[in-house]
């Protein structure tokens, strides 16, 4: 019973604002298609988001601070984005452990005891709650499986969260568990149970029948940076930024090799890949104001600037009439001979100031084409081009800023 718990507050160093994700669990995955066409779908990828958050905690790494507006209207990274795929992989991992069977067996049991089974209420209080408390007192955050379903048709309504603290009030007979719930990003959720009645009430609106400690196997998380930019940080001239393609998560990269395809300018290649080295761009005044020294102004939607590749004298550059090698769209390069083809207009989604968490387009001023990239099968490096089509391939955001 809960009276076995040590009274008082016990919590570990897990922080939902640091190790959790800033977007909600709005994924939809169909697990099984039943005869007749009905489907069983997960209500998101809660298990993947919970496990990956713990991966970041154990690795001492912050999770990316990308918010839901970056992928509007879907609110989550699309399939093909490295973060979406990492969450999917960890979701599948969460079904491959022994405790995952409890999502099925507990959904078929009643709350109270029978002559065969102890019931969900007793199993939670006598078995799972003491185990959870012992792990938390030892400094170990835990994936919890929350159960609400009462039959197999509604098993997908069950849920996975991260527990990182608990408080037991021996006088009130009340246990409060601190949760990171992927359905409620960026805030602490509590799960409250009482000694004298069944059920666990979550502060974000649901009553759960019970919970169990879900098996977790640590993985090394994919991570492009140890220093993600704060989403509310204004971007200014003079900043050095790492830019990431919103729809694939690839980093805008300026290389040392040159284009050599037919019709090329022969200038240095620009690609999108998974490496941060060689990807810092200093934001500089537009070409006709390049002699200015006051480079600390905040950037606002509609402003024109240049992007100089760090450690070189080359700027992000494009030009009409020169095709890219794969899609034959407008070639994008880095180039040292300064001219107006170095000028790019920042277009912030929703207008206003450019913040690190904003999604933006970079519009080439002389041609009106937008900087973009898209995945190509089997390519480790994505081609970066400029295109007149203002589709989702043209959204970018900031990964790092300094």
Image: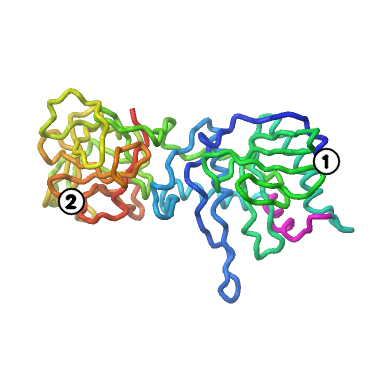
Residue in the foreground of this view, choosing between 288 and 375: 288
User: Considering only vertical position in the picture, is 291 above or below 122?
Assistant: above
- Left or right: where 95 falls relative to 401: right
User: Considering the image in quadrants, where does the N terminus appear?
Assistant: top right
Magenta-tinted stretch: 98-112
Q: Pointer 1: what residue? A: 1
User: Considering only vertical position in the picture, is 235 above or below 351?
Assistant: above
Residue reaching furthest front? Answer: 172
Residue at image point 14% right, 33% down: 336
Residue at image point 37% right, 41% down: 274
Residue reaching furthest bottom? Answer: 36
Residue in the foreground of this view, choosing between 26 and 37: 26
- Left or right: where 269 falls relative to 233: left
Q: Label 2, secondary structure: give it.
A: strand
Q: Pointer 2: what residue? A: 330
Instruction: Of the two numbered discs 2 and 1 on the same chain, state the one appearing first in sequence.
Output: 1
User: Considering the image in quadrants, where does the C terminus appear?
Assistant: top left
Residue in the foreground of this view, choosing between 57 and 186: 186
């Amino acid at each position: 019973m809960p009276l076995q718990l040590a009274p008082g507050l016990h919590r570990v160093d897990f922080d939902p604002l640091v190790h959790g994700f800033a977007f909600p669990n709005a994924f939809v995955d169909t697990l099984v298609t039943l005869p007749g066409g009905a489907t069983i779908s997960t209500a998101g990828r809660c298990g993947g988001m919970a496990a990956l958050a713990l991966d970041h905690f154990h690795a001492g790494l912050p999770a990316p601070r990308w918010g839901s507006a970056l992928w509007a209207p879907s609110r989550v990274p699309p399939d093909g984005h490295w973060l979406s795929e990492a969450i999917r992989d960890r979701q599948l991992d969460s079904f491959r452990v022994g405790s995952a069977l409890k999502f099925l067996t507990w959904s078929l049991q009643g709350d109270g005891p029978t002559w065969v089974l102890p019931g969900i209420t007793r199993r939670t209080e006598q078995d799972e709650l003491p185990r959870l408390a012992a792990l938390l007192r030892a400094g170990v955050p835990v994936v919890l499986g929350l159960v609400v379903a009462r039959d197999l048709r509604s098993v997908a309504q069950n849920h996975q969260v991260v527990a990182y603290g608990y408080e037991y009030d021996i006088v009130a007979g009340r246990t409060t568990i601190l949760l990171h719930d992927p359905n409620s990003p960026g805030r602490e959720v509590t799960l409250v149970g009482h000694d004298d009645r069944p059920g666990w009430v979550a502060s974000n609106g649901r009553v759960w029948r019970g919970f169990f400690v879900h098996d977790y196997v640590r993985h090394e998380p994919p991570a492009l940076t140890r220093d993600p930019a704060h989403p509310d940080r204004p971007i200014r001239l003079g900043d050095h930024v790492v830019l990431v393609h919103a729809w694939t998560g690839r980093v805008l990269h300026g290389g040392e090799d040159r284009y050599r395809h037919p019709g090329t300018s022969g200038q240095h290649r620009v690609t999108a890949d998974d490496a941060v080295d060689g990807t810092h761009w200093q934001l500089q005044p537009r070409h006709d104001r390049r002699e200015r020294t006051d480079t600390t102004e905040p950037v606002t939607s509609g402003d024109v600037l240049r992007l100089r590749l760090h450690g070189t004298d080359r700027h992000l550059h494009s030009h009409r009439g020169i095709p890219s090698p794969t899609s034959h769209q407008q070639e994008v390069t880095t180039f040292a001979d300064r001219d107006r083809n170095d000028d790019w207009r920042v277009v912030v989604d929703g207008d206003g100031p450019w913040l690190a968490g904003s999604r933006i387009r970079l519009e080439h001023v002389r041609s009106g084409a937008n900087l973009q990239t898209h995945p190509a099968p089997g390519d480790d490096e994505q081609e970066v081009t400029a295109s007149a089509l203002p589709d989702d391939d043209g959204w970018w955001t900031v990964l790092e800023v300094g």
